[in-house]
């Protein structure tokens, strides 16, 4: 206060550059001193906040080192639930439900989510990752023991229940399910010195969504909101010796929401540079503008909703025969096409994005109801009136008839499960949950634009399990629709429909194109099921293949739609792009080589290369 009362007099008159004397001015107190004092106070407050955060981090690290962290009382695994690992404890190929430290994988709990948790059981040939990874325990906020909350509920309760915008089948719950699968994966190690990869378990979707909409905030340790928690994560990584040794190149974090929201999060132009130095699992449409072009960007997938079927659909434990799945699925089919989707948005700026959907319904209906209005220029009332008349109808293309159960608003289940094919068109954005709903329900997706493929992982061979029908104009659409309808006919001229008393399918080469795509869907279904270990394992393997080309596998024995990274003899251990990554000991890499070599010896080529034997595989 004394400093603020200080001042000095300005001259009562000033002379301009032209030599003309200006009007007299009043003596003023020093605004410069006031500015300096305020800026000094802000700087001191900021440094004090950082100091308190660092003291808290050090205290938590010491507590964890003393065993002060308590284990989770529910399904998440924490250090207290595991034996201490010793050198050489990794096995070449972990057996069924056995962790790499030799301890039995815990059985899933019983309760409302027991069926979903049973999918976390795995077969040896269903997983690809061969390097150990560590999850930062202090950031594992999905563990109920951490007492982190989302909208006042424990984070696990919010996601496992039917919380608005989240829930077990919310399309944006992939970050939660990604982290949950990481806690159950057999290659997880509880000792960071024995890890080659590191998972930063940031729940990016709720942390970023709060800046877009009035949604609940995550709170932990008296901190709430995206800016505070992202700041904590960034400072935590900056203090981690495991992060600093390779500058985050062997770390992966989750950023499965619009990247621009993250760019807007920092204050005063400061960015969270440590988070951005991690490899990124991110929102698929941001692949053209990644947050850090010097890091890998793995395009995320939405969580699909499976239509319950009157037959077992899980292929994770290897107990279900693909032929049985296909036969049971095909007997359920009642119609050729379905698209359960919103056709209009309340906000007019989105309506143009939904024009592709309205175009599809209008063109399908035109086969029965005559020429539709132009979906791009017709009034909303004209489009509504036309759409109300096109539900549950039979149309024709060329010399063949087809049936449509629903095109537009409707009940997704069992409509989608009972359709042979489902249209996938853009809505708010190019990526959509709809394609994953179709795959998990045993329905072949029909893409309507090449750009839709760009929002998904580039290592998937979409030609094996999807159709493409362009919606640029009616002529192209009719040509594509004709090809799709023709694909349901087998080489012998019969149509790929099964009667109730039929139990056999023809050999692969005698199937129709539609049946072959359906086979690949059932064969690879778990790649899209986030309630299994497989999506997490797939992403981590492709990061492994990028960082260490010498640890690439020959083939994915169970999966037929994965484009495996090229493998070469005598390849340099690390990708030159990343340089020589540092790790604790050569033994870690030697053990990873052993596991990779054992996989190559056991699976030298894709099992279904011999299509003659596919039914007995």
Image: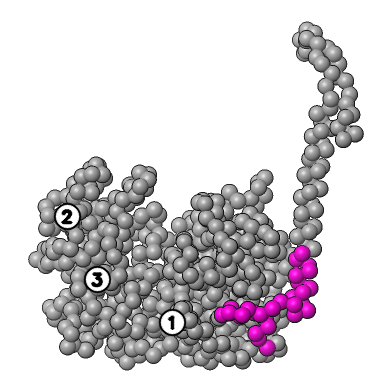
* Residue that numbered label 2 is attached to: 389
Q: Position of residue 589 (x, y in %)?
A: 64, 82
Q: Residue at x 52, y 84 (%)?
A: 109
Circle 3 — which element? strand
Find the residue positioned furthest to the top: 20
Q: Which residue is mark 3?
A: 419
Q: Residue at x 82, y 30 (%)?
A: 32
- Which type of secondary structure does the marked residue at label 1 adopt? helix
- Residue for point 61% across, 91% down: 103
Colour scheme employed for the rendering of this structure: one colour
**Category of crowding for the residue at label 2, using alpha-carbon neighbours closer than 10 angstroms: few (below 14), some (14–19), many (at least 20):** few
Measured in 3D between alpha carbons, the distance from the residue under mark 2 to the one under mark 1, in whole angstroms, is 40 Å
Position above or below: 140 against 186:
above
Q: Quadrant of the C terminus?
A: bottom left
The residue to which callout 1 is attached is 115
Q: Which residues are magenta?
A: 56-83
Q: Which sits in the foreground, 79 or 448? A: 79
For label 2, the SS is loop
Residue 422 x, y percent position in the rendering: 28, 66
For marks 3 and 2, the one nearer the N-term is 2
Q: Is residue 391 visible?
A: yes
């Amino acid at each position: 206060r004394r400093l603020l009362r200080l001042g000095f007099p300005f001259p009562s008159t000033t002379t301009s550059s032209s030599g003309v004397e200006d009007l007299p001015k009043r003596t003023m107190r020093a605004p410069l001193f006031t500015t300096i004092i305020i800026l000094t106070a802000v700087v001191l407050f900021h440094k004090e906040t950082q100091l308190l955060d660092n003291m808290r981090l050090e205290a938590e690290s010491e507590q964890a080192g003393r065993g002060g962290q308590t284990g989770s009382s529910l399904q998440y695994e924490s250090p207290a639930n595991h034996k201490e690992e010793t050198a050489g404890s990794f096995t070449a190929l972990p057996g069924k439900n056995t962790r790499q430290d030799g301890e039995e994988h815990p059985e899933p709990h019983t309760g409302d989510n027991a069926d979903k948790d049973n999918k976390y059981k795995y077969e040896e040939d269903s997983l690809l990752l061969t390097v150990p990874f560590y999850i930062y325990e202090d950031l594992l906020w999905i563990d109920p023991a951490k007492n982190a909350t989302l909208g006042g509920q424990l984070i696990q309760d919010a996601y496992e229940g039917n919380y608005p915008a989240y829930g077990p089948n919310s399309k944006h719950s992939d970050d939660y399910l990604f982290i949950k699968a990481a806690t159950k994966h057999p290659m997880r190690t509880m000792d960071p010195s024995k890890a080659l990869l590191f998972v930063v378990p940031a729940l990016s979707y709720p942390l970023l969504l709060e800046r877009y909409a009035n949604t609940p905030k995550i709170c932990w340790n008296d901190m709430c909101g995206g800016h505070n928690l992202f700041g904590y994560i960034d400072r935590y990584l900056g203090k981690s010796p495991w992060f600093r040794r390779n500058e985050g190149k062997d770390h992966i974090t989750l950023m499965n929401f619009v990247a621009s929201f993250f760019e807007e999060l920092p204050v005063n132009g400061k960015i969270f540079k440590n988070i951005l130095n991690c490899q990124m699992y991110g929102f698929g449409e941001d692949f053209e503008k990644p947050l850090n072009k010097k890091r890998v960007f793995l395009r995320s997938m939405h969580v699909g909703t499976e239509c319950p079927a009157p037959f077992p659909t899980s292929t994770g434990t290897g107990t279900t025969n693909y032929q049985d799945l296909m036969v049971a699925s095909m007997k359920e089919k009642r119609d050729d096409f379905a698209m359960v989707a919103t056709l209009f948005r309340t906000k007019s700026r989105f309506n143009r994005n939904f024009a592709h959907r309205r175009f599809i319904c209008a063109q399908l209906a035109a086969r029965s109801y005559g020429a539709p209005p132009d979906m791009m220029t017709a009034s909303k009332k004209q489009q509504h009136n036309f759409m109300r008349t096109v539900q549950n109808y039979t149309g024709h293309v060329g010399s063949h008839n087809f049936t449509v159960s629903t095109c537009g608003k409707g009940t997704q289940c069992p409509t989608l499960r009972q359709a042979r094919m489902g249209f996938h068109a853009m809505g708010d954005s190019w990526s959509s949950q709809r394609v994953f709903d179709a795959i998990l329900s045993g329905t072949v997706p029909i893409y309507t634009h090449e750009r839709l493929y760009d929002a998904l992982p580039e290592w998937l061979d979409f030609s094996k399990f999807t159709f493409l029908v362009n919606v640029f104009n009616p002529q192209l659409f009719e040509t594509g629709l004709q090809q799709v309808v023709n694909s349901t006919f087998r080489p012998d001229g019969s149509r790929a429909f099964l009667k109730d008393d039929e139990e056999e399918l023809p050999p692969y080469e005698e199937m129709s194109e539609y049946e072959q795509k359906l086979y690949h869907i059932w064969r690879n279904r778990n790649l899209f099921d986030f309630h299994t270990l497989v999506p997490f394992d797939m992403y981590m393997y492709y990061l492994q293949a990028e960082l260490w080309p010498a640890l690439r596998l020959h083939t994915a024995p169970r999966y037929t739609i994965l484009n495996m990274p090229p493998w070469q003899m005598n390849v340099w251990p690390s990708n030159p792009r990343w340089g020589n990554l540092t790790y604790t000991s050569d033994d870690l890499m030697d053990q990873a080589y052993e596991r990779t070599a054992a996989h190559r010896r056991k699976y030298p080529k894709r099992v279904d290369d011999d299509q003659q034997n596919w039914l007995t595989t």
